[in-house]
Amino acid sequence: MIDPRQRTSRPRAMIACALVAVLTVAALGVAEAQQNRAAQQIKYRQAAYTVLGTQFGIMGAMAQGRAPWYAKAFAIAAERAAFIATVVPDTFPAGSESGAPTKAKPEIWRNEAEIGRLMTDLQSKTAALATAAKGGNVDAAKAALGAAGQTCKACHDKYKLD
């Protein structure tokens, strides 16, 4: 004959084991979701920088004579760069420092004030570049491109892995 205490403790033990298993699976799911989110944020950041870099590449080729000067194409690239510069500051949320390969140094998340200043500088310099490009003066557009490029360099030198 089965002791009545064993009958009630066995189901409780099974329920407890099942509950532990469910909670473990749920915790692993949350961790995986967080890692996937971080990976998506890193990909978003990289995509934004790809678009920004492509615009600088288009303008740089024209400015250096590696491509024919086409004022309208230069102005379009400058407008795109100015727009993407408004997006870039949002691509470094907390938690996106790992989860996928990234060239951003960990210090970028620890120096908010300086990053904010650098991002504001990028936005103002790319806006000035777009204005200069619309003006049609080749020398002014080239000078504005150089100034905008220096803002990129200032951040890359300090916060980007080579």
Image (cartoon, helix red, strand yellow):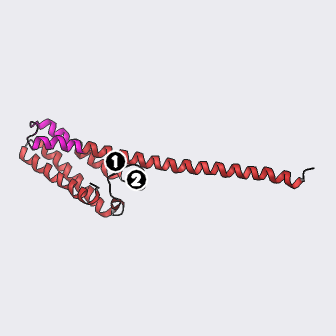
Residue at 9% across, 44% down: 64
As drawn, is 113 to the left or to the right of 124?
A: right
Q: What secondary structure is found at the residue carrying circle 2?
A: loop
Give the residue number, with chain letter if any, for mark 2. Answer: 96
Residue 78 shows in this picture? no
Say if the magenta span includes residue 41.
Answer: no
Q: Which residues are magenta?
A: 53-79
Residue at 59% across, 48% down: 26
Q: What secondary structure is found at the residue carrying circle 1?
A: helix
Q: Which mark is residue 143?
A: none
As drawn, is 135 to the left or to the right of 13?
A: left
Q: CA distance from mark 2 to mark 1?
A: 9 Å
Counting other residues with Cα less than 10 Å from the Cα at mark 2, is it few (<14), some (14-19), or many (20 or more)? many
Give the residue number, with chain letter if any, for mark 1. Answer: 45
Up the image or down, 13 lies above or below 54; here it is below
In the picture, the quarter occupied by the C terminus is bottom left
Residue at 11% across, 36% down: 70
Up the image or down, 94 lies above or below 75; here it is below
The part of the image, by quadrant, that contains residue 156 is bottom left
